[in-house]
Amino acid sequence: MKKLLIVINILALYNSVYGLETSRTEIGKGGKIVGGLEIAIEQAPYQASLMLRWYHCGGVIITRDFILSVAHCLEGINHEDILVRVGSAKVNLGGDVHYVDVVNIHPKYDKLTYDYDVSLLHLTKPIKLDGLTKRIAVIGSPRDALIPGTPVIVSGWGETLNPNENKENLRAVVLTTYNHLQCHQKYIFDGGITTQMFCAYRENKDSCFGDSGGPVVHATNRKLLGLVSFGVDCASSSHPSVFTNLSADILRHFNADNTMFIIITAILLTNFNAAFSSRVARNQIGVGGKIVGGEEIKIEDVPYQASIQFFGMHICGGAIISKDCVITAAHCTFRVVANQLTVRVGATKNFDGGDVHEVSKIKDHPFFNIETYDYDFSILQLKKSIEIDGVTKKEIRMSMLNEKLNEKTSILISGWGETRNLAEDPNVLRSVILSVSNLLQCHIKYIYDGGVTKRMFCAFTLNKDACAGDSGGPVRRLSDGLLVGLVSFGPGSLCADPNYPGGYSLISSVRNWILINAQV
């Protein structure tokens, strides 16, 4: 059993730039929950607790037979000493307890730098998957985890800063991914950050509560990005936390002569065939994306704009369509519980001003397809009506039923997100004007990824892109001011890619469904 909780690398050179020496520290083992909220197991049914005689580390259900965790939690531990609890929000109570018969630590794991910090546990009996225990898909593409500003959810157990809070209950917090190069520079005298890692940070919040080995999940598509690995101090103002990057590559590098390699490869091929082919992967755009060619605006310019927030963190855009309802993209609300969401309206900044509304009900379109993003519409019903003032809060009228968008139609897209200019504030509302693209040509571009359906349209302007809009954000036709679409998908993290226009959900194709469910 590993006795040291802190691994200290002896520095050959004093870090005069930062004025301190950093040490690589396992986070979460008895760590402190910083800025987290208690959640039910139904909100993170993939969560697992790894126990020796008491709680030891976090883990993730990836199949009925396998748990994923980090290598530094399991190095030197006999598999017979490990128990895995699933299906319970209580760390030492309830759910089902499983025995482990095989522990496979990544062959490239480096115990000094925590490179390739991943391990795989095989259970003696399969997990019974139900509403309390569910497997989670791995992200598959390494670039998706490294887009700065992407909201991620970290969950786990641990000590809290508040003595009145119950440390036995599962908790979660939303962080945002951090620039990889800047994070590498923070840890440069402690081994740096490799491509098998990524960083995340949020002021006064941290993943210390997340426990080593715990899951790091994309806030919108609910896929597993990584595992809690190491950091310096809880909620450190100088150093982000570091996580194992669960790209296809790191998992495929398990020993080829080991059956684990075959199993992991099969998992990835099943869930992320696009990760191993040359075709374009369809990804939600704008969530933490880069504003390309846009300009700052005020809420008065787009008073129908809404910010969809998960545990208080902006994750998607939306549009006010009535005093009681906001429309957004279904991939933003997929597998989300209503009480996890709030909606900020009437604000230029996504973290301040305006009014914040709780959500009472989420109505995803019944035909929504998470693989192709067809029918990518979701209506959020609010607990309290929006006070429409016509200046900073105003409904937007929708285009008519089955109305087509002509090629070269000018549209305006608005939202929040990271920018390419570090001097620009990523939390300030921005907009960009694009032109509707030829639908057939766009369909051909995405043909190997499901194509473009009748519920979609495409738009593009050279050196400009809808990454500015955030997924679910409103698309307004300039000629008449009508809502014609919502930001939906694009070719992954390549904002303003000249080869691939952005994809949008066409409002007119489901206008009747919206009218009925929003009671407009």
Image (cartoon, rainbow, N blue to C red):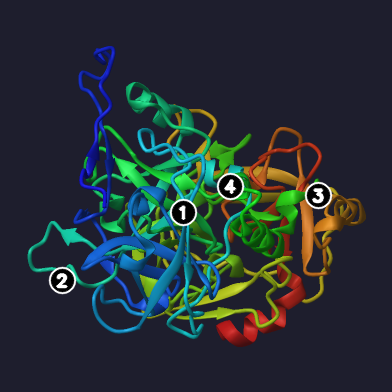
User: Quick one: 182 or 84, which is closer to the camera?
Assistant: 84
**Labels 3 and 1: the sequence-earlier one:** 1
List the residue tagged with mark 1. Answer: 119
Residues under numbered marks 4 and 2 in contact, where contact means CB atoms less than 8 Å apart: no
Disc 3 is placed on an element classified as: loop
Percent x, y for residue 35?
24, 56
Percent x, y for residue 406?
86, 57
Residues under numbered marks 1 and 2 in contact, where contact means CB atoms less than 8 Å apart: no
What amino acid is at disc 4?
A: Asp
The crowd level at tag 1 (other Cα within 10 Å; few <14, some 14-19, many 20+) is many
Percent x, y for residue 225?
51, 53
What amino acid is at disc 1?
A: Ser
The crowd level at tag 4 (other Cα within 10 Å; few <14, some 14-19, many 20+) is some
Mark 3–mark 2 Cα distance, whole angstroms, equals 48 Å
From the image, state whether disc 4 or disc 1 is nearer to you.
1
List the residue tagged with mark 3. Answer: 279
Percent x, y for residue 358?
36, 73
